[in-house]
Each structure stands twice: as structure tokens, then as C-alpha cells.
Amino acid sequence: MGLALAKGILLSGKIAPENILISDKDEEKLELAKNLGVSTTTENKKVTEESDIVFLAVKPAVVRSVLTEISEKLNGKLLISIAAGIDTKTIERLCGARVIRVMPNICAEIGEMTACYSLGSRTRADDERILKEVLAGAGKMFKIDEELMDAATAICGSGPAFFLELMRAAEDAAVELGFERETARQIISQVARGAAELLKTGEPDKLITRICTRGGTTERGMKVLEEGKVGEIFRRAFRAAAERSRELKKEI
């Protein structure tokens, strides 16, 4: 996710690669980062010392250990955390940084990120503006109350995987019906893109009704989806992801 964010940040063209420093213990991941033209290191403290803005892009389980390592260099700096489940109050107890919590998704790497963010208690008036400027090339951002961040983790963070699972099934079905896989993928991608844009124009129920002709093909397919309770399965998936986000705070 950190690498995806770096790609998204660079898409705006406002931040030069040499102004980004990425730290990771995994040399293979750093090699991927180097392909972007950014600077790399294996030392977290080096990033903290040399940066005005620090992204905490680590797994929730290591948040405490990483912050303990770099906390003395974070005082007064802007820390943007994308660690799932870890609230701003917890991070503020572990360091003296100004904290913004963000839940982005992997689509940042193509400039189509959907992210939600909430501000910590120490943030300054211009920190929100800085956040938006830095991530301007990555996609769209929505400010929410922090109590909704676990839900945002499910919808924004996990959502792309759930929709891709549906699209994979559609792609497989297209292949079974005779399409070449690459052609099927392009078609399904465009169908999904069109449906996403259509959703902006009205309520899903009304739009589905418009597409379904009595006795037609869509109606028959929708009956299969309804019998399989596909909608409920998707809701369960999102609820499960949100619940897991709530659990993560207890594990640091």
C-alpha cells in the first residue's frame, strides 16, 4: 500500500521523486520503489529525521514498535497513518506528532484512489490542506468522523478486492460463454466502469428496474442473484472487514 501511495503522489507531478524517501526492511520492496526514482533506506529513523511529512504505512501489529523506534524524531511533525484499526488517540499516546488517519486503497497507484480521513487532536489549520495537496494525484478523499473509520476500512480499503472478485466471476462467465479472456477482461472492465458512473445518477434499485425488462434476460439473471443472496453475502463481507478493523486496535 505504501508503494501504491508513492505512485499516486507522483501522479500529480507536484512532488519530485527525489523528495520522497521510503523505508522498508525488505530489499525486494525497496528495489520496486527505486524504479519510481525515489530514494530508499532500511532505516526508519532516517525517514523521520529527513522528512517534514511522514507516512506510517505499516501493519497494525507493528505500529507500537515502529513508533517507539522513531517517536523522538516525530515531535511536532505531521504523521499520516494508514494503519488499519489504529485510532489517532492511540498514535498520539505513542508519539508527539500531529496525526491524520487515512484509509486509502490500492487504486492510488493509478490515480483512482478512494480514501477517507479523520484529523487527530493536534492537527493545525493547514494540515488538512497539506494532506490533500500531497495526495491530489492519487484520487478522491472524503473527510469523516473517526468513529466511521472502521467502516471506511471495509468500504475503501477492502472494497476493491470484493468488487474485483465479482468482476473475476463475470470474466470467467464471459470466457465460458465463448469470449477470449483478454477481450472478456476489457469488456467487463468497461461494463463495471459504466455501472459505477451510472450509480452517480440515481438509486441502485431504480436503475436496476430500468435495466430489467419483464421476462427479459436481466430479470432472469437477477433472480439467480437473489436466490443466491449475493447482496447479503456482499454485506456480510463488508461487515466482517469492518469488525476485523475494530479488532486490530486490541492487537498492538
Image: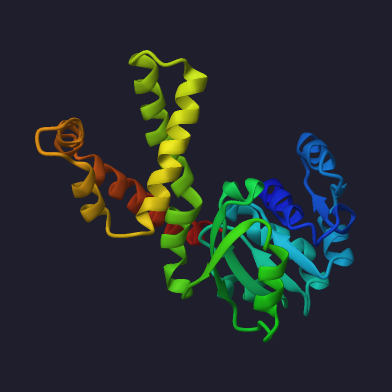
Q: In the picture provided, is 63 more to the left or to the right than 214?
A: right
Residue 169 x, y percent position in the rendering: 37, 28
Of residues 27 and 111, the one nearer the viewer is 111
Residue 69 x, y percent position in the rendering: 77, 61
Image quadrant occupied by the C terminus: bottom right
What residue sits 76% from the left and 38% below the top?
29
Above or below: residue 178 compared with residue 11: above
* View extreme (bottom): residue: 125
Residue 234 x, y percent position in the rendering: 31, 45
Above or below: residue 13 compared with residue 71: above
What residue sits 69% from the left and 78% below the top?
127
Of residues 74 and 183, the one nearer the viewer is 183
* View extreme (left): residue: 215
Q: In the picture provided, is 4 more to the left or to the right than 172?
A: right
Q: In the picture provided, is 19 more to the left or to the right than 8?
A: right
Above or below: residue 234 compared with residue 166: below
Residue 251 x, y percent position in the rendering: 52, 56
Above or below: residue 216 compared with residue 198: above
What residue sits 47% from the left and 48% below the top?
158
What residue sits 64% from the left and 75% below the top?
92
Total marks in image: 0
**Quadrant of the image occupied by residue 86:** bottom right
Which color scheme is applied? rainbow
